Image (cartoon, rainbow, N blue to C red):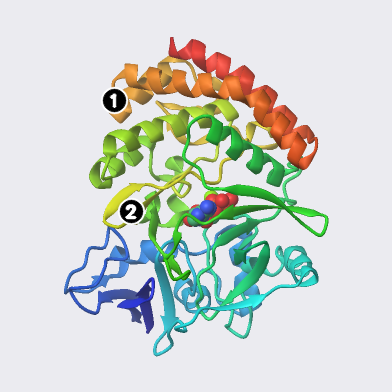
Amino acid sequence: MLNVYFDERHVADLWLENKYYCFRYIGLDVPAISLSLPVREAAYLNDEAKPYFANLLPEGESRTAIELRLGVTRGDDYALLQHIGGDCAGAVTLFPYGEQPSATPEYEELSTSELIRLVRELPRQALYTDHSGKVRLSLPGVQHKTALYVENGTFYLPENGAPSSHILKVQITTLPGVTHTVENEIFTMSLARHSGLNVPDVKLQLIGDTPVFLTRRFDRQKSPDGKLHRILQEDVCQLMGLEPTMKYQNSGGPSLEDCANIIRAYSSDSLSDIEHLIRWTLFNIVVGNSDAHAKNIAILQYSGVIRLAPFYDLLSTLVYGTNLDSGLAMSIGREYDLKKINRGSISQFAEFLDVKPRLVQKVGRDMVERLTSSARGALEVYQQSYGENCVVQAIADLSIKRAETLDELLS
Ligand SMILES: Nc1ncnc2c1ncn2[C@@H]1O[C@H](COP(=O)(O)OP(=O)(O)O)[C@@H](O)[C@H]1O
Ligand SMILES: [Mg+2]
């Protein structure tokens, strides 16, 4: 059996019965771990709770690397949760029956040479989870990454269930023709901020001479005593009870219309969050991000308020030309090809989301205006901070050009 915690509180249990998942809250006065799994007396059985937990786990190569290292059977979600569920996205953590997070968080300081080794070994030692079971971290996504605690420029490894404060991603090295993805994501996130999107703090961090992408976690909050607490965060797959393998619309996964419906069902300010969804979609068209799928959009619940989470995992895929597919994770109207979006796709997009075309026009114009007036400046700031980079330069050029095209499509 696994004990399920919400931040520091044991709230539920998860166990297997004849290979079937059983999830049950331990009382009726505990916080729900998911908006899709409200607190109730009866257990949630198999398909009802399984997707929520499956969505906490790493995907693709990262997952395979962990399975191999820890000797876990391929595809065994439950065993993986048992090994690495000590710090996940959002408020939830999982501990083997009887174990619990230590009352005082345990952080092991990393020297520069240890940090360099950690980054070097990440592709093989995914998430840096270890055999001893001390480091038990899980994050979704396919890119190589880990979660750390960072304070005053010092990096620490969170141990025995201590919450991490930052996420660190390394360069993608396995896709031919796809380079400088760290620089790409840093710059695209900065363009997003300039375009009026809510994004977390990000930084290009040099570890030795290796650049990595470092982002502050928005699902962690410090209390006045300086202790870090976990906040409920869940992605659209979790909210819709879909397995992570369903994250793409054309494999039966969520559409932008589904995302809008999720916002209408749950957000404390759905009007404003629908506008954010529109802005995010149009921004992705402009920078050429085809991989904006249902696990790259989430909600946060904090102090009783439910809002769209800040946007993450924004990078230009189009800048790599034919080395990456331009097929969209979620269609714009009926259009699945980033390169073929036209006036009709934009008006269908408004229709499918059940919003006035004028709202899409207004949000789009504002986004385009902000982006075109600040892209060159953002590029200069990037170059001053981190030096020149061919991919970043190309993203700036491409975005300015595509912003003009979008402006025409909106008129
Ligand atoms: N700044 C952040 N704060 C909190 N959670 C985050 C943040 N950035 C990413 N995440 C979480 O980590 C997961 C993986 O990050 P992401 O950048 O999407 O990686 P990948 O490129 O592998 O998909 C996300 O799905 C989200 O749950
Ligand atoms: Mg992602």
Percent of width and height locating residue 392: 72, 34
* In front of the other: 379 or 173: 379
Which residue occupies 40% across, 30% down? 278
For the residues labelled 1 and 2, say whether their Cβ atoms are less than 8 Å apart: no
Q: Amino acid at mark 1?
A: Val
- The residue tagged 2 is 239
194 horizontally vs 242: left or right: right
Q: In terms of depth relative to the viewer, which is nearer, 303 or 32?
A: 303
The percent position of residue 302, horizontal first and vertical second, equals 33, 56
Residue 88 position (above or below residue 3): above
Q: Is residue 39 left or right of residue 274?
A: left
Q: Determine which quarter of the picture holds residue 262.
A: top left
Q: Quadrant of the C terminus?
A: top left
Q: Give x and y (percent) for residue 3.
A: 37, 81
Q: Please indicate, yes or no, whether residue 54 appears anywhere in the rendered image.
A: yes
Residue marked by disc 1: 355
Query: Residue 51 at what x, y percent from top left?
Result: 37, 61
Q: Residues within 10 Å of mark 2 (few under 14, many from 20)?
A: many
Q: Tell me if residue 111 comes above or below residue 319 in the rendering.
A: below
* Ligand 2 within 8 Å of the CB at mark 1: no
Asked whether, in this view, residue 387 is left or right of residue 229, the answer is right
Q: Residue at x 54, y 63 (%)?
A: 165
Q: Quadrant of the N terminus?
A: bottom left
